[in-house]
Image: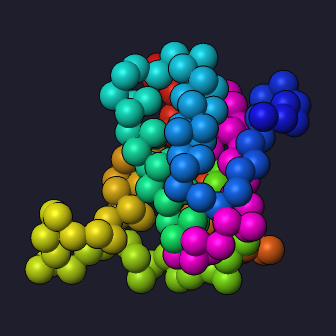
Amino acid sequence: MVLVDSDTRELRVSSEFRHGHRVRAFVREAVEECGFDKQAVADLMLAVTEIFNNAVEHAHHFEAHREVVIRVHRHQGAIQVDITDQGPGFVPREAATPPASFLPTQRGLGLFLARNLMDEIHFSHGAGTTVHLVKHTPR
């Protein structure tokens, strides 16, 4: 972990599922300091896990030499988790909603879940894709 500034922390891991626990622990530590209840923390952990897994599988195609960067930004009234991959990018609206015939046991719900668990989700593209997950702090 790197402390970028007083409100931003950064973790860099190789693109492997086995680092998921490190990513979740890193994010959980920052989030729990912000006064979120257990449900909000669980929602954020699930969204982070899904986006991290998407980076490993879909952006990097299991190429462990690639890197995933996770940044946690604590803002006044919100926490933002940015997950950046080194992949070619994708069109987010194509992955927004599962088809009506989708079964709950099928794969492919990661982005759908993240959209429904977060207060905001944004995407930016540069040298890869960054998914910005935003959860507002309790009032």
Q: Is residue 131 visible?
A: no
Q: Is residue 57 left or right of residue 37?
A: right
Which corner quadrant of the image does residue 2 belong to? Answer: top right
* Magenta highlight range: 58-81
Q: How is the image coloured?
A: rainbow
**How many numbered marks have been drawn onto this rendered protein structure?**
0
Query: Looking at the picture, how far across and down is residue 51, in whole percent?
Result: 51, 58
Residue at 41% from the left image edge and 64% from the top image edge:
111
Residue at 67% from the left image edge and 77% from the top image edge:
87
As drawn, the residue found furthest toward the right would be 5
Give whichever of 90, 135 is nearer the camera: 90
Residue at 77% from the left image edge and 41% from the top image edge:
10
Q: Is residue 96 left or right of residue 86?
A: left
Query: Looking at the picture, how far across and down is residue 22, in whole percent?
Result: 60, 38
Q: Is residue 10 visible?
A: yes
Query: Looking at the picture, how far across and down is residue 24, in whole percent?
Result: 54, 37
Query: Looking at the picture, how far across and down is residue 92, in whole percent?
Result: 50, 76
Give whichever of 45, 124 is nearer the camera: 45
Residue at 57% from the left image edge and 77% from the top image edge:
61
Q: Is residue 58 left or right of residue 125?
A: left
Give whichever of 43, 62 is nearer the camera: 62
Q: Is residue 99 left or right of residue 74?
A: left
- Whether residue 108 appears in magenta in the rendering, the answer is no
Which corner quadrant of the image does residue 85 belong to? Answer: bottom right
- Whether residue 70 appears in magenta in the rendering, the answer is yes
Which corner quadrant of the image does residue 60 belong to? Answer: bottom right
Position of the N terminus, as image quadrant, is: top right
